Image (cartoon, rainbow, N blue to C red):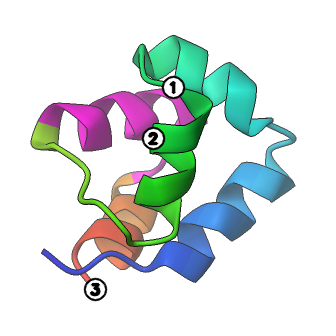
Amino acid sequence: MKLDYKKIKKVIKEKGYRHDFIAKKMNISKQSLSYKLNGKIDFWTEEIKMLSDILDLTPQEKMEIFLK
């Protein structure tokens, strides 16, 4: 699966979330989230679902970000 890392970072910024908040909600370290958002390590399927829920992504946004 190829993610649109620029778009997910843009959505996080637009919605006003901080990485430490998202990491805590996902039960991962801020460092792990950073690696995932920068494509250094992959998101697990469950993490994608959690991130989508946290960011309240629309079906269209999910497709654009996670199914690029």
Residue marked by disc 1: 29
Q: Which mark is residue 68?
A: 3
Q: Which mark is residue 32?
A: 2
Q: Toward the viewer: 27 or 3?
A: 27
Residue 53 sits above or below residue 40 on the image: above
**Image quarter hosting the C terminus:** bottom left
Q: Toward the viewer: 3 or 31?
A: 31
Task: Tell us which disc is closer to us: 3 or 1.
Answer: 1
The reply to whether discs 1 and 2 touch (Cβ–Cβ < 8 Å) is yes
**Cα gap from disc 3 to disc 1, whole angstroms:** 26 Å
Residue 32 sits above or below residue 43 on the image: above
**Image quarter hosting the N terminus:** bottom left
Give the mark nearest the N terminus, 3 or 1. 1
**Cα gap from disc 2 to disc 3, whole angstroms:** 22 Å
Residue 67 x %, y %: 22, 76
Q: The disc labelled 2 sits on which kind of residue?
A: Ser
Image mark count? 3
Residue interval drawn in magenta: 46-58
For the point 29% across and 67% down, which residue is it?
66
Q: The disc labelled 1 sits on which kind of residue?
A: Ser
